[in-house]
Amino acid sequence: MSISAPTYPIDSAPVDESAISAALHKYFGFGDFRPHQREIVRSILDKRDNFVVMPTGGGKSLCYQLPACLGRGACVVISPLLSLMKDQVDAANDNGIRAASYNSAIGEPLRRDALRRLNRSELDLLYVSPERFTMDSFRDTLLSADVNLIAIDEAHCISEWGHDFRPDYLALAGIVDLFPRIPIAAFTATATMRVQNDIITRLRLREPRIVRASFDRPNLNYSVIEKDDVESQLLCFVRERENQAGIIYRTTRADVEATAEFLQANGQAALAYHAGLDDAIRARNQDAFNKDEVPVVVATIAFGMGIDKSNIRYILHGDLPKNMESYYQETGRAGRDGEPAECVLFYRRGDIPKITHFINQVVDERERQRLHASLQTMINYGGTLLCRHKAILAHFNEDYPHGSCNACDVCNGAVETVDGTVDAQKILSAIVRTGQRFGAGHIIDIVAGADTVRIRKLHHDRIKTYGSGKNKQKMYWKTIVDELLAQEVIQQTQDQYPTLRLGSRAHAILKGEHPFSIVRKQEPKSVSKPKQTPAGVYDEALFERLRRLRSTLAREHEVPPYIIFSDKTLHDMAQKFPSSIEEMLLVNGVGEAKFARYGADFMREIDEYVSSHPGAPASAQQRLDSSSAASSRPATIRRGVTHTTDQTYKLVQEGFTIGEIADQRELRPSTIYGHVEELVKNRKVADISRFVSDGQRKKLTGLFRKLGTASLRTIVEHPQAHTTYEEARLVRTCLQIGQ
Ligand code: ADP
């Protein structure tokens, strides 16, 4: 690979580490970086090119959003998924980052507005599609604007060796010539070394800093469950996790529909999603799931690309996935917020011959071999006695450094092996003694000592093995046959009347030279249901109330609930019971802008809960203290007076405006708006004329009366409003308390 030396000067003022940490807290509300984030941010700020492979949920977006907030000029984000752009822009704006998108999905006025803001240096982030980026007129606009970083999301799309090649991405090849002074950061969740080299060469990245994060997702709990009556098993699993968001993957459209109907018929809200559904229905179902309106989606693998939802708590596979890459990618959609999530594969050895049969229909020999190899990987995974995290990482050539993950059925002792040598010998012997000419049903009948016409006619009741296994059910013998097939001790012919034949290992087992082990797994109902967050135990009733409030606010602001606060943030609130602004700002995920927008509502909800459950904070604290998994962050939370609002109150009484108070206190105006809103609610401040002019207040009050108070966004985006969320909220608060 030939890489030219950097041609751009290192000309920006250095940003020190404390400013980076402060921005992490201010914009994102996070106390710590996730692995690799700090070094990537640092290197972007040092104007180096970066190439980053980080798994889904690893926190890639923060790596370019944070430098965008710290530096001068805008970061242009090239992203292929139009459907995600709106949510990405909403999420950034909610964090107080000035973001917009420029694409064909938004109307001309919004596009003009985005460019106007870009030219006036009023944007931190501009999301564009690769197609747009290739247009000359758009490039000219960028060249004349103050752009300080180009981030390429889903960078694997530029490589023909990757699994999602997009010709549009090829046009990004000339990017370094056009923007020689601007660092480029390419991100992807999946890239083999070959794809990585290809991306770096095609983009001509200049001595990029290369980061390959671990593929491990420690918060995902993997398990495999013996598949039996799969629809009932899925129902049982879902019922035990009421209100939690989950995806159930099934292979065929027919199974997707049948499973969704089965769940619905049993009182479980669930929607179907597959490529055969009408576009509008698909979009509606995805939207309902995204917005937490329905907890479960039953889908084929067509579902998932456009999903950024961070609070998916489980991914169930009702059928064997086609390969390990797909399984990793599909299960990777769970727990992006870093909270525990479950990934369960329902698997039956008996499904394998059917899949093998389909694979054998593939005409191209190389493709057929590839499919067989992929199937074998999944069979090995299903039957493994190795830690599942370790098994998955091994597939991606990564070593798992820990002895036990404590987050899979194998490490948690839910899987055991039992010796099945003698029973395997009984089946093998029956196959040999009948000349390897019969199918599984007949062989099982012989071992189980069944009295059938066929057995009598063929005199198979006279062979030595007949009835040797009559003390066990036929179902058990079927499992042994499935297991022998899965471990390739025997094979099944693929003709119209499949028969069983011995494989190369069979003789050693028959002669007792080799043992034969069977893997035994737990029933679905005993799958442990994690209620502990990594940071300790939270108050579940309060969490439920906060979750409901989040849904209400999400409808009001017309954004998906997870954009308001992640589950992790709500868990943290339900553990720490913050009662002041300072305490609230210590909650993981509560940055200044989010606090200003939503903080007061959540604090009120917590307050109301504590009034009716006065012992709750103390017992949460007790549980936290005694929890061995307690957060390393000290539990400094104490219910008390809010000093910071009091300070604002004093300045309000002295007659200062919001801008003046913000300057004096070195806080953002939005934070001061939050304080004032709290003061208005507590009826400490009655006159808001200094913060919102009488004329503006009258106009906004009129709009609220006409359009209702449910959606702030409706008011803020109303052409006559000319207002901000903060101002509109303040006016609405006055209206709501009858002031
Ligand atoms: P990716 O793009 O790599 O899939 P995202 O950027 O969407 O991941 O981040 C996944 C989730 O992790 C988001 O909910 C985000 O807010 C959260 N997150 C990112 N960085 C941190 C951090 N340093 N601390 C806590 N949560 C984080």
Image (spheres, rainbow, N blue to C red):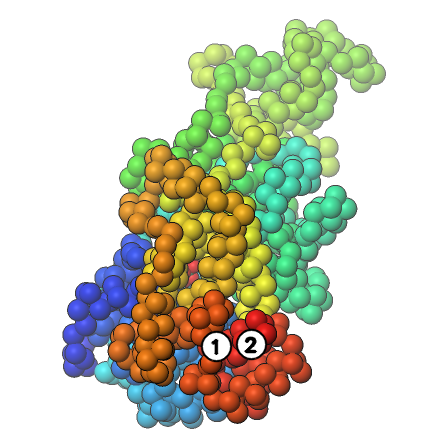
Q: Secondary structure at mark 2?
A: loop
Task: Tell me the residue at 60%/13% (across/down).
Answer: 426
Front residue (pair 373, 623): 623
Q: Is mark 1 within 8 Å of ligand 1?
A: no
Foreground of the two, 511 or 421? 421
Q: Are marks 1 and 2 in contact (CB under 8 Å)?
A: yes
Query: Is 379 on the left or on the right of 191, as rendered?
Result: right
Left or right: where does residue 236 sit relative to residue 119? right
- Say if 498 sits above or below 54 in the image: above
User: Which residue corresponds to the image point at 30% horizontal and 37% vertical from the top-left?
Assistant: 402
Q: What is the number of the mark on residue 686? A: 1
Find residue 170 and report its image quarter: bottom left
Neighbor class of circle 2 (other Cα within 10 Å; few <14, some 14-19, many 20+) is: few
Task: Identify the residue at horizontal 73%, vertical 32% (top origin).
Answer: 497
Which corner quadrant of the image does residue 521 belong to? Answer: top right
Query: Above or below — where is 60 with respect to 739?
Result: above
Is residue 709 in view from this perspective?
yes
The amino acid marked with disc number 1 is Ala
The residue beneath circle 2 is 739
Crowding at mark 1 (Cα within 10 Å: few <14, some 14-19, many 20+):
few
Front-lying residue, 163 or 279? 279
**Quadrant containing the N terminus in the rendered view:** bottom left
Q: Position of residue 591 (x, y in %)?
A: 37, 65
Q: Percent x, y for residue 643?
A: 32, 63
Relative to 10, is 301 above or below? Answer: above
